[in-house]
Image (cartoon, rainbow, N blue to C red):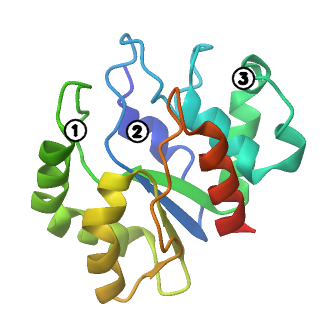
Amino acid sequence: MTSYEDTRQGYRPDHVKVLLIAESPPPPSRVASSRHFYRSDEIRRDDYLFANTIKAMYPEAATKVESELEQDKEQWLRRFQADGFYMVEALDNSLEHAVTKQERQDFIAQNLPDLLQKVSKLADKSTKIILIKSNVFVVAAEPLRQAGFTVLNTELLDYPGRFNQKAYREKLAKLIG
């Protein structure tokens, strides 16, 4: 079975123009979750991060329902890649929903050296960085800026779970616009 990181690497652009950094990778593929951005092996309900990211970035996707986007997920991911977009996570391990906000922020803070190293391997000074979710923004925005990276958001970008989908799409579209 292919790991999520291997799957993600298959969509890595030659040059990353915009690096999106979410909080943590998805759980194993067998677990129902809204966080399976790069998995296109099966159609998933409620793949909120993928659907709302694509809707924000591509105007022709904005009116499509999630099931249509999922049906053509491989093509959307290839377009995302071709346009120089890439998404990674601040953490290397998936977090369960029960983990508190403070614990999440503590994990991100503890992982900052690894995150900075990861970003250094993917981005250069021309790469634009967008931080997804308040935990990532609060903990990582300033250290990334101090390391010389261009973080586009000056405020948090809501995670597009069951709530905040419209706000996420609007803010993300403005950032990449």
Q: Residue at x 60, y 36 (%)?
A: 50
Find residue 57 and report its horizontal and vertical position in percent. Answer: 74, 53
Type of the residue with mark 1? Asn
Under circle 1, the secondary element is loop
Query: Relative to residue 70, is residue 12 depicted above or below?
Result: below
150 with respect to 78 (left or right): left
166 with respect to 99 (left or right): right
Query: Relative to residue 83, is residue 141 depicted above or below?
Result: below
42 with respect to 100 (left or right): right
Under circle 3, the secondary element is helix
Observer-nearest of 4 and 25: 25
Q: Residues within 10 Å of mark 2 (few under 14, many from 20)?
A: few
Type of the residue with mark 2? Asp
Q: Residue at x 45, y 74 (%)?
A: 123
Q: Are marks 3 and 2 in contact (CB under 8 Å)?
A: no
Q: Which of the two labelled residues, at mark 3 and mark 1, occupies the earlier sequence position?
A: 3
Q: Which residue is mark 1?
A: 93
Number of numbered labels in the structure image:
3
Find residue 93 and report its horizontal and vertical position in percent. Answer: 22, 38
Q: Which mark is residue 6?
A: 2
Q: Residue at x 79, y 21 (%)?
A: 68
Q: Which of the two labelled residues, at mark 3 and mark 2, occupies the earlier sequence position?
A: 2
Observer-nearest of 50 and 73: 50
